[in-house]
Image (spheres, grey):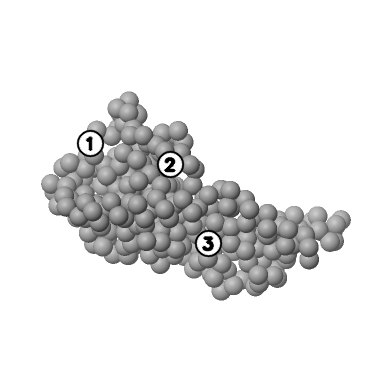
Amino acid sequence: MPYAARLIYPRLKVIGTFHDMTYFFLPEFHVGWKREMFKFYIGLTARRADKILTISENSRKDIPKYCRPKNPDISVTCMGVDPRFFESDMPDPETLLRYGIDSSYIIYVGTLEPRKNVPGLIQAYRDLPAELRETCKLVLCGKTGWLFDEIYESLKTDAKLMSQVVFTGFVKDEDLPSLLHGAAASAYVSFYEGFGIPVIEGMASGVVTITSYGSSLEEVAGDGAVLTDPNDPSTISRALAWSLSAGHEEEKAALIRRGIIQASSYTWDRCARETLLAYADIKER
C-alpha cells in the first residue's frame, strides 16, 4: 500500500484487496516470518484504506473479525474461470505421456503445501478399494511449496502407493483444461481458501468435482460439487469411491450439469465490473 504517497497527496484514495485472513487463524499453515509480516500489514492497511475488496462472501465476513477496517463496507469481487475450461477436449496421448499419466486418474491442481491438505487427499486415496486404485491413479499437479518433503516422505514407506501417485510438477496453462476434462474426478479438499479457482475450473471442465466445506469453497461450489470434511479423510475417500464406482450415472451427470452452471456464473468480466463499481464508489466519496 502506498502509505508514503499520502504525505504528498493527502486526499489520495486507496483501495486494498484481501484474499483471506488465514495468517490470523491458521498460523500453522504459514512460514513464521511471512505470517507476522502479513498480519502487521493487513492490520495497517485495513485501518488506512478507503475501501477493501475481497474475493468471496466468506472472506468478507472474516475480515472484521481480525482487523478494524476504516471503511466497514467491504466489496466482494469474485474471481473467474477461463472460458477454455468449458470448451476443452480430451488430452492427447502425447500430453498424458509428458506428465507421466498412463491410466484413468483423479486430478488435484494446486501448490503442494500444508494448507491444501494433500496428505489428507493421499490418505483418502490410499483407503480406496484396491481394485479402484489399480485402474485409477492420483495425479498431483502443481509446484512444490513449503513442507513439501513431508508429503513425499509419507509415500516412501508404501512402494505400491508411490507407484499409483503421480507428481507432474508445474502444468502449462495450455495443457490444464484438457487434463482436467480427461480426469475421472477433480479433488481439491483444502482446509481453507479465500476463493478456490481449481474448484470452478474442475466444474467448468465437466467432471465430478470434490471439495471441502468450512470456507469459501463451500460457497463457490454451491450445489455443483461433492462436499467433504477436510479433517476426515474417510469422507473424502467415500466421495472418491462414489465418483469412480460404476452406477449412480444419472446422479453424477446431474451433479456435473449443476457444476457447469455454477462455474459459468464466475467470469472475469463480472470481476472487472464489480471492481470498477468499487473504485467508482470511492471516487464519489
Which residue is pictured at 26% across the width and 42% down the height? Answer: 105
C-alpha separation, residue under disc 2 versus residue under disc 1: 22 Å
The quadrant in which the N terminus is found is bottom right
Q: Are marks 3 and 1 in contact (CB under 8 Å)?
A: no
C-alpha separation, residue under disc 3 versus residue under disc 1: 36 Å
Dot 3, crowdedness within 10 Å: few (<14), some or many (≥20)?
many
The quadrant in which the C terminus is found is bottom right
Q: Which residue is mark 2?
A: 85
Q: Is residue 89 above or below residue 118?
A: above
Q: Tag 3, which secondary structure?
A: loop
Which residue is pictured at 59% across the width and 72% down the height? Answer: 64
The reply, left or right, for residue 138 in relation to residue 46 is left
Residue 219 occupies quadrant: bottom left
For discs 3 and 1, the disc positioned in front in the rendered view: 3
The tag earlier along the polypeptide, 3 or 2, is 3
The tag earlier along the polypeptide, 3 or 1, is 3
Query: Which residue occupies the foreground of this view, 175 or 266?
Result: 266
Mark number, residue 237 = none
Q: Position of residue 56 (x, y in %)?
A: 53, 61
Q: Which residue is mark 3?
A: 56
The reply, left or right, for residue 62 in relation to residue 255 is right
Which residue is pictured at 58% across the width and 62% down the height? Answer: 76
C-alpha separation, residue under disc 3 versus residue under disc 2: 21 Å
Q: Position of residue 62 (x, y in %)?
A: 53, 69
Which residue is pictured at 30% across the width and 55% down the height? Answer: 254
Q: Which residue is mark 1?
A: 103
Q: Position of residue 189 (x, y in %)?
A: 36, 57
